[in-house]
């Protein structure tokens, strides 16, 4: 049986998760969606779009979708849904999990990789994060959960943008890009977003392209006045290297200093597979809890194909991608998003994992 795609919907209290969810559920897309709500949510889905509000934790909706609350843990709820689908008791094609406003999406995402039974039935498609433009600055400054939600995202939606000035919105977008250059950012008015930005993002698909916001790289270039696509030896031989990885923080020109930050590493020399595996294995043992999302397209010695790798906290996987096209520069590109990650240690270790040519 085909795997059931699952989407995690996260965002701070009042950011508009339920508004977005209602839009997805009531739109005529012809898909049957099961919604799992964490029952501590600030507002439950309106009874208007439910057929009946029963005592059972699974409720049919008027458009054929279903809704259920997490009674025990997520794993058990997912298992229950899959079992009932298999028996033909309920019908759905995908799952959306709405987390509470205070949730760290990490453990929710890990459920799809760590539990064999869940992994055999579901495919984690992506993490959507809603950011409330009016209250974002305060929430990001004061709550690490809000920062983590941004760091984990495959797609970021900004709600309530009409309540702030264009300058404030621009500053927020700039800040979010520095925290997570992988995730596209879109302004969403009252949950009005196209479904292709919500479903089938393939954010956890190993063979998905590694998209890093080009404006993020432009920012770094402007900040540091030097070519981002460095040659590895600069790190090793020049302690005054101007590469962003050696600045205190590449967001140093901002007024805030977020715990969740990202940085991009590039190398023009191939990696030694054994050295890289040893180094990354050691790094995730030590810093795994602080590593939110990390992803890369790598040039590995010994293969003509791209190697794609990604991880969530301590869980890491890699896969062979397509062959390097003729004429394309074989540049390894990695992005790390995490909480106070030691860039100097990561850069030095990655440099030392490159093949000796």
Image (cartoon, rainbow, N blue to C red):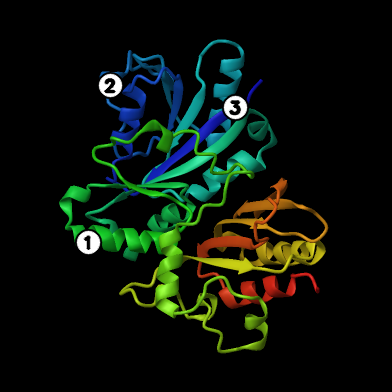
Residue 289 seen in render: yes
Badge 3 element: helix
Residue 276, horizontal then vertical, whole percent: 75, 64
- Give the mark, 1 or 3, whose residue is nearer the N terminus: 3
Residue located at (59% from left, 74% from top): 230
Residue located at (63% from left, 52% from top): 310
- Give the mark, 3 or 2, whose residue is nearer the N terminus: 2
Q: Which residue is mark 2?
A: 47
Viewer-side label of 1, 3? 1
Quarter of the figure that contains the C terminus? bottom right
Quarter of the figure that contains the N terminus? top right
Q: What is the distance, in whole Å, between disc 3 and disc 2 at their CAs?
A: 25 Å
Q: Which residue is mark 3?
A: 79
Residue located at (47% from left, 43% from top): 127
**Which of the 4 image quarters holds residue 144?**
bottom left
- Give the mark, 2 or 1, whose residue is nearer the N terminus: 2
- Residue furthest toward the top? 88
Residue 131, horizontal then vertical, whole percent: 32, 50
Residue 120, horizontal then vertical, whole percent: 68, 30
Residue 200 marker: none
How many C-alpha atoms fall within 10 Å of the one at disc 3: few (<14), some, or many (≥20)?
Answer: some
Relative to 187, is 172 above or below?
below
Could you say which is closer to the camera, residue 304 or residue 167? Answer: 304
How many C-alpha atoms fall within 10 Å of the one at disc 1: few (<14), some, or many (≥20)?
Answer: some
Relative to 194, is 306 above or below?
below
């Amino acid at each position: 049986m085909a795997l059931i795609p699952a989407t995690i919907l996260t965002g701070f209290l009042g950011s508009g998760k339920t508004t977005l969810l209602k839009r997805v559920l009531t739109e005529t897309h012809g898909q049957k969606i099961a919604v799992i709500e964490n029952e501590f949510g600030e507002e439950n889905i309106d009874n208007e779009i439910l057929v009946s509000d029963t005592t059972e934790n699974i409720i049919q909706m008027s458009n054929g979708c279903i809704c259920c609350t997490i009674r025990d843990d997520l794993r058990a709820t997912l298992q229950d849904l899959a079992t009932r689908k298999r028996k033909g008791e309920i019908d759905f094609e995908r799952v959306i999990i709405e987390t509470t406003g205070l949730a760290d999406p990490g453990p929710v995402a890990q459920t799809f990789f760590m539990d064999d039974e869940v992994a055999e039935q579901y495919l984690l498609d992506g993490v959507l994060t809603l950011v409330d433009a009016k209250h974002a600055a305060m929430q990001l400054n004061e709550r690490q959960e809000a920062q983590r939600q941004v760091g984990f995202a495959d797609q970021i939606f900004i709600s309530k943008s009409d309540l702030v000035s264009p300058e404030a919105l621009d500053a927020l977008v700039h800040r979010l890009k520095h925290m997570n250059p992988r995730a596209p950012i879109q302004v969403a008015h009252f949950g009005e977003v196209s479904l292709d930005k919500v479903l089938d993002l393939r954010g956890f698909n190993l063979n998905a392209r590694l998209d890093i916001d080009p404006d993020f790289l432009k920012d770094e270039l402007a900040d540091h006045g030097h070519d981002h696509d460095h040659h590895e030896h600069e790190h090793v031989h020049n302690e005054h290297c101007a590469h962003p990885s050696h600045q205190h923080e590449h967001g140093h020109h901002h007024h805030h200093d977020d715990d969740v930050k990202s940085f991009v590493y590039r190398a023009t020399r191939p990696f030694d597979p054994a050295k890289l595996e040893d180094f990354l294995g050691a790094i995730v043992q030590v810093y795994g809890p602080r590593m939110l999302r990390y992803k890369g397209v790598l040039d590995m010695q010994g293969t003509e194909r791209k190697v794609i790798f990604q991880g969530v906290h301590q869980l890491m996987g890699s896969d062979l991608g397509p062959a390097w096209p003729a004429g394309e520069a074989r540049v390894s590109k990695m992005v790390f998003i995490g909480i106070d990650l030691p860039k100097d240690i990561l850069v030095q270790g990655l440099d030392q994992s490159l093949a000796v040519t």
